[in-house]
Image (spheres, rainbow, N blue to C red):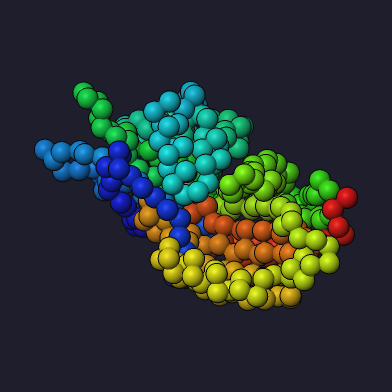
Amino acid sequence: MSKLLVRCIFTFLLFTVCVGAQLPKESTWAQYKPGTLSSIVRAHSNPVGSRDKGIDLGSDPVRARVTYTGRSRPTSAVKQSFIAFYMESLGTPDSAEKFKTEMLFIEDDTEFWLPVQDVLVPYFREELHQGESVTLLANWIGTTFPRRGESRLHIILVNEFEKSEVLRSARATPAQWVTIVGPDRDFTVDYPTEPKRDKYRGKSSIGKAGPLIRRYSLLTDSLMLVLGFQDLGYPPNSQFADSVAPTYEQKVREAARRAGWKLVRIRRLSKSIAETEAWERSRAPDGYVHSISRTVVRNGQVYDLQCRSMFIDTEVDRAICDRFLSSFRILGPPQ
């Protein structure tokens, strides 16, 4: 059983995302080991008589055989708040929006109301009948802050299910990628499906607003794919308008050292493209998050592409990452 647990006091919880050492390869679904929901709860429950002082955050994936009841309801506010807090600690706050519904399952006469990924809800209803047995691929992510007169809640998220021996995750995977054209018609990039688009201002300086950073982001069941881009402010004839800075590697290593990161590699693919692979350390929950990123500098613009695992201690799907990163093409100067 994988157990990555950190106990913390809610008021003083601080978390940072850093880069850590490379860990052994293991597919996303292979991390879900056969077990029971009850055993997961017992493993993360305090001894009788002990005092609960804070929340628990962690990651403990399990394959559990349960009975489907067909009952569902909106995910409670308490659980939604905890899920949002957990996803924020991983640096993936948008993932909290994926669990708006919780469903009732029964395991050995014990009822479990579990938040289910939105994309799975219609498939539960279409493929299963009330009273039917099903295997859940669920992940315990922590327990809530204790409330007076109430028990702490164990938060277990359902990320997939198996009706038969074959994992049916293909239903949540788009069959064909889409090509996105930049808003200034200066680039194209491929995503598995349409990404979310937003923009924000970077850090400002005295008397000057921060740079406008635009971003396309997509969260899948196992990956976060992000492209952020901005104008560097260099004149067209500047030597820095089409090349990664000579000090790029040095600055990345210094930043990694300050944050306690360990890098897998930094390499130049060309004078205008640099790639970094790392395991990012997550302190809450404790563990490492694998990522591969590329920085592209062309026509006075910088484009940062990142492929990041959504799971602690799990390597990214390299085929998807390579497809995403390699699909990026410069069409010309922004129009």
Q: Position of residue 283 (x, y in %)?
A: 38, 55
- The residue drawn where x is 43% and y is 25% is 77
* Residue drawn at x 83%, y 67% as measured from the top left: 237
Q: Nearer the viewer, residue 194 or 15?
A: 15
Q: Is residue 60 visible?
A: no
**In this figure, what is the number of numbered marks?**
0
Q: Quadrant of the N terminus?
A: bottom left
**Residue 72 shown left or right of residue 249 in the figure:** left
Residue 95: image x %, image y %? 54, 41
Q: Is residue 27 above or below residue 169?
A: below
Q: Nearer the viewer, residue 119 or 316?
A: 316
Residue drawn at 16 percent across, 43 percent down: 47
Residue 164, given in percent of the width and then of the height, sits at: 54, 47
Residue 321 in view here: yes
The residue sitting at 71% across, 75% down in the picture is 269
> Which quarter of the picture shows residue 331?
bottom right
Q: In this picture, is 125 found above or below 28? A: above
**Direction from residue 206 to residue 187 in the image, left or right:** right
- The location of residue 151, given as percent across then percent down, is 25, 30
Instruction: State left or right for residue 181 relative to residue 259.
Output: right
**14 w.r.t. 251: above or below:** above
Give the farthest residue toward the front.
207
